[in-house]
Each structure stands twice: as structure tokens, then as C-alpha cells.
Amino acid sequence: MSFLTAIWLLPVALLLHEAEEWNILRWEQRNFVNLPAKTNVSVRTFLVFFTLFGFLWTALAALSNNPTIAAFVLLPFAAGAFLNALQHLFYTLYFRQYAPGVITSIVLYLPIVGYLTARAIEENLVPVAYVVVLVILTILSLIQTMKAGNIVTPPFRAMSHIGMALSKWLHIPDAERR
């Protein structure tokens, strides 16, 4: 399978991961102390939006029809998926319970990100230094998550606000907001 074909594994994994998170709100409400205002509709709106964004990001990477450009464009997305997988693992251990998204994180995200990253390095599509920078950024973000514990981090808060704004902008009915 060519690298340009293999990159499509990531948004498919994202789709399945977001499906696993479909009912995450109740879990968040039980575990976080400063959860911003959100509803099931706003959470699901964000999940759909982010999944579409993942497919568009991958299409942008593939559009060049150049594996090197595709690797440079796609690997930050892969690093974000890797971070999210590590966050789900952390939350599962920290809260000592299933964190919605942890199964697809382990079964899909980790192997796919590892595969795409290894291919990009082995095929000399990106310098190792590029991957090292992405790994360092991922580790720094994970440290922020770990320090926060059950406190909502600024990126997590921003996602909540985006979900609320999108669901209102799209006029999606929400019985919880009435």
C-alpha cells in the first residue's frame, strides 16, 4: 500500500474513535470539576465537525499527490491522535474507570500512528528531527493533561466552546438547552 493510500487509515480511525466517544458527556460530568457548559448535542456536533475536519486534513495532504508533502501535512494530525490516545490511557488510569475512546486509542490510534510515522521515516519522507519535534510537543501537551488531572485544560475547554457555537450556529435542536 502506498503512503498516499495508507494515510487514509487515520481519518477512518478518527471516525471510529469519535463514535466510541459519542456518549462521553456523562463521563465528563462525573469526572471533571470545572466542565464548561455543553450538551450531548454540542458534544456530538463537535465530534462530527472534528471527524469531517480530519478527512479534509487528510484530503489536503493527499491532494499534492506527493508522499513527502503528504507526510509533512499529515504527521501533525497523527501527533494529535497520538496525544489523544495517551490522554485516554491516562484518564483510564487516573479515574480508574473506562474512559470513552480508550479502546480505539489502543486498537487503532497507536498502531496506525506508529505505522504512518515509521513509514514516513523509513521512506525518508520527513527528517527524524521533524518527528522528534512533534513527539516533544506531544509530551508537553500530555504533561499539561497529567498536571491538570480532573481540571479541564484550555484546549479541552476550547473544544467545548466550539461544539456549543457550532450547534447553535447550525440551529440543531437541543432539548437540554431549552
Image (cartoon, helix red, strand yellow):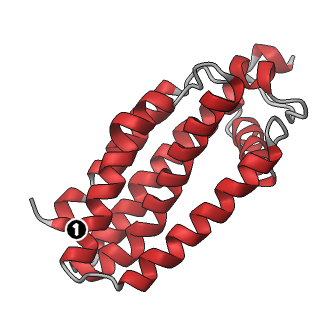
Q: Is residue 2 left or right of residue 120?
A: left
Is there any visible trace of residue 83 in the rendered image? yes
Choose top left, top right, bottom left or bottom right for residue 59: bottom left
* Residue ID at (75%, 41%): 160
* Residue ID at (70%, 20%): 27
Query: Neighbour class for label 1 at 10 Å: few (<14), some, many (≥20)?
Result: some
Choose top left, top right, bottom left or bottom right for residue 47: top right
Q: Is residue 114 above or below residue 105?
A: below
Q: Residue furthest left?
A: 1
Q: Is residue 39 above or below residue 7?
A: above
Q: Residue furthest top?
A: 175
* Residue ID at (70%, 56%): 143
Identify the image quadrant of the N terminus.
bottom left
Residue nearest the observer in this picture, 39 or 107: 107
| Residue position for label 1 | 119
Residue nearest the observer in this picture, 71 or 160: 71
Secondary structure under the numbered disc 1 in the rendered image? helix
Q: Is residue 150 left or right of residue 140?
A: right
